[in-house]
Amino acid sequence: MTQKDHKIYGSVVVNTKGQIILPVEVRKEMGIKEGDRLLITGKWDNFIGIVKIDTLEGFINQMNWTDTKIDDFKTYKKK
């Protein structure tokens, strides 16, 4: 998949704990494995994005977050 490609992997269901399971295909293609930290983002009041913390620099550039520093996300901790 190139940087400009977009893909729909299917849908997921939120369980009673608010958790979702990422489809196997997503985990394989994105190299997501147990213990990886993921950042959950939102845009336009109804869009949710998930990105691996270690790939944030390219993501920030694509989202045009010019006032955001990569270190802001590397130090993010659940409150």
Image: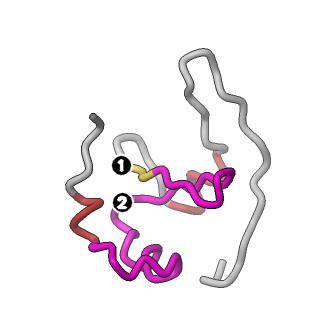
Point 54% across, 61% down: residue: 30
Q: Residue at x 40, y 41 (%)?
A: 34
The picture quadrant where one finds residue 58 is bottom left
Residue 61, position as x, y percentages in the image: 45, 82
- At 72% across and 30% down in the image, what residue appears? 13
Residue 51 is tagged as none
Q: Is residue 9 above or below residue 63?
A: above
In the rendering, which numbered label is found on residue 37?
A: 1
Q: What residue sits right under mark 2 in the picture?
A: 53
Report the amino acid beneath label 1.
Arg
Percent position of residue 18, x then y: 56, 25
Q: Name the residue furthest top.
A: 16
* Rendered-image quadrant of the N terminus: bottom right
Please give the range of residues in magenta. Answer: 40-69
Quick check: 73 above or below 17? Answer: below
Q: Are marks 2 and 1 in contact (CB under 8 Å)?
A: yes
